[in-house]
Each structure stands twice: as C-alpha cells, then as structure tokens.
Image (cartoon, helix red, strand yellow):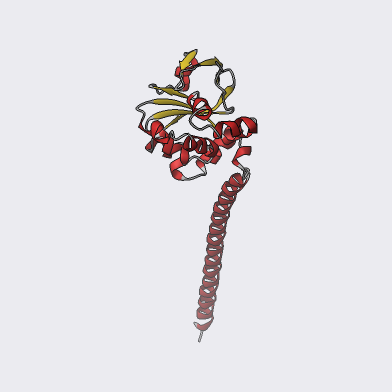
C-alpha cells in the first residue's frame, strides 16, 4: 500500500509528459499550416502581379508605343510571336505572329510581298509598330492601301534593306543604306538612340527571325519623292 503514492506520482508525471507532447504536436502542425499558407499566399501574389502587369497593357495595340510596353506585349502574346519564338520562322511569317505588327502585316499581305520577304536569304527590316501606323495620316495610309503594287510597295520597300542582316551596332556605324525600293535610307546614331530615314526612331532593336534582323520603329517612313 505504501507504493501507491509513488505509482500515482509516476502516472501524474507520464500524463504531464503526454500533455506536453500533444501540445508540441499542435504547435508543429500549426507552424506547418502557417508555412503552407504563407507559401500559397506568395504564389498567389506572384500570379496576381503577373496578371496585373498584363492587364496594364492597352487592349488596342495602336496605343502600345512605349518600348517596355512593346516588349511586354510581344512577350505576352503567342509563343511564335515572342522575341525567341520569331527566330524559328522567316520574317513574313514571324511578323504575322507578332501582336504589335498587325497593320504592317495587313499592308504586306495587300502588297503581296509575304513570299518575297520569306524567301530572301538575308534582310534588315525596319518594322513600324501599330502605334506608328496609328500616327500616320489616314489619307496617306488609305492611298497606299489603294495602290498595293505602286505606292504601298514603295513605302514598304523603303523599310527593307536586302542582302544584309544588320544589327544595331552595325547600323550605328553605317550612315546610309540602300533599300529594297532603291531609295537611300539615312542612319544616325546618338548614344544608344538610332534614327533612320530622318523620321523614325528604333524602339526595339535586334529581333532575329530565320532570315532577317528586325528593328521595331515608331514612325512609318515615307520615301523621298522623285
């Protein structure tokens, strides 16, 4: 009978230890739950951030004029139209997948120049963005589209240099280029800025396609008359 107090004491100790272990287990589970919740929140925040960045782009591509927004629009479009994706196709096809070159693609199709561009061995293309076409006098654009084998071909040809794939570094040291239309295109470099034809600024340089180096420009260049 004298051992009973000792047994009772031992049972009390064991019960206390069991309670402590259970409490610790609850703490561990709570910590794990908190960590999982935090990770989930972080992933959701990253997703929301990406979605928010995409939603900042105007729906009308004619309003996408800033260099950063142009790149963002291109990279968030179809994979074959991204800066990396365009490398797989010849320039006429690659441009058709680019979300900020829709008006240019329409003009190239109207002039029946897709095959000419796609089969050329090497080209340098100054590609006006939708924003550039939006700034063009509508009467000039309408007149060009109404004369696809004449004025339109001359305007588009003024944006293409045959036989060479010129990088922005090449352009910086090349003051004049002979275009597809036969007209001379001037090039001026000031720091990192490139101006072509005395009219347009290169806003996204050095986009590679299977047969061309493309430079996005902010103005549709009108070739000299006469």
Q: How many marks?
A: 0
| Viewer can see residue 205 | no
Between 22 and 150, the one nearer to me in the picture = 150
List x then y, in percent, for residue 56: 63, 44
Report which quarter residue 64 is drawn in. Answer: top right
Q: Quadrant of residue 201?
A: top right
Q: Is residue 137 left or right of residue 197?
A: right
Asked whether residue 154 appears in the rendered view, the answer is yes
Q: Residue furthest bottom?
A: 1
Quadrant the C terminus occupies = top right
- Residue 139 occupies quadrant: top right
Residue 34 image offset from top left, x and y in percent: 57, 59
Q: Nearer the viewer, residue 191 or 8?
A: 191
> At 39% across and 35% down in the image, what residue appears?
115
Q: 107 or 101: nearer the eye?
A: 107
Q: Residue at x 59, y 31 (%)?
A: 143
Q: Is residue 175 above or below residue 117?
A: above
Left or right, residue 16 beside residue 92: right
Query: Could you say where residue 109 lies in the image, as x and y percent from the top left?
Result: 47, 38
Residue 13 position, x and y percent, is: 53, 73
Residue sitting at x 46%, y 16%: 177
Q: Nearer the viewer, residue 26 or 189?
A: 189
55 is higher (above) or lower (below) than 91 = below
């Amino acid at each position: 009978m004298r051992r009973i107090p000792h047994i009772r004491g031992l049972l009390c100790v064991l019960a206390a230890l069991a309670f402590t272990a259970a409490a610790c287990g609850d703490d561990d589970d709570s910590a794990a739950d908190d960590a999982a919740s935090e990770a989930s929140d972080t992933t959701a925040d990253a997703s929301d951030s990406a979605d928010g960045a995409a939603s900042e782009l105007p729906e009308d591509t004619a309003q996408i004029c800033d260099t950063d927004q142009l790149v963002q629009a291109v990279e968030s479009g179809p994979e074959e139209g991204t800066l990396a994706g365009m490398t797989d196709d010849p320039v006429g096809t690659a441009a058709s997948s680019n979300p900020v070159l829709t008006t240019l693609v329409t003009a190239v199709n109207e002039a029946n120049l897709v095959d000419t561009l796609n089969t050329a061995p090497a080209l340098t293309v100054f590609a006006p963005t939708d924003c550039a076409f939006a700034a063009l006098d509508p009467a000039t654009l309408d007149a060009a589209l109404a004369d696809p084998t004449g004025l339109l071909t001359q305007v588009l040809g003024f944006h293409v240099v045959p036989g060479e794939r010129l990088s922005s570094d090449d352009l910086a040291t090349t003051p004049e280029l002979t275009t597809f239309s036969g007209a001379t295109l001037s090039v001026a470099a000031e720091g990192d800025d490139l101006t072509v034809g005395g009219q347009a600024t290169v806003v996204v340089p050095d986009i590679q396609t299977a047969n061309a180096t493309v430079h996005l420009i902010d103005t549709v260049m009108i070739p000299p008359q006469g």
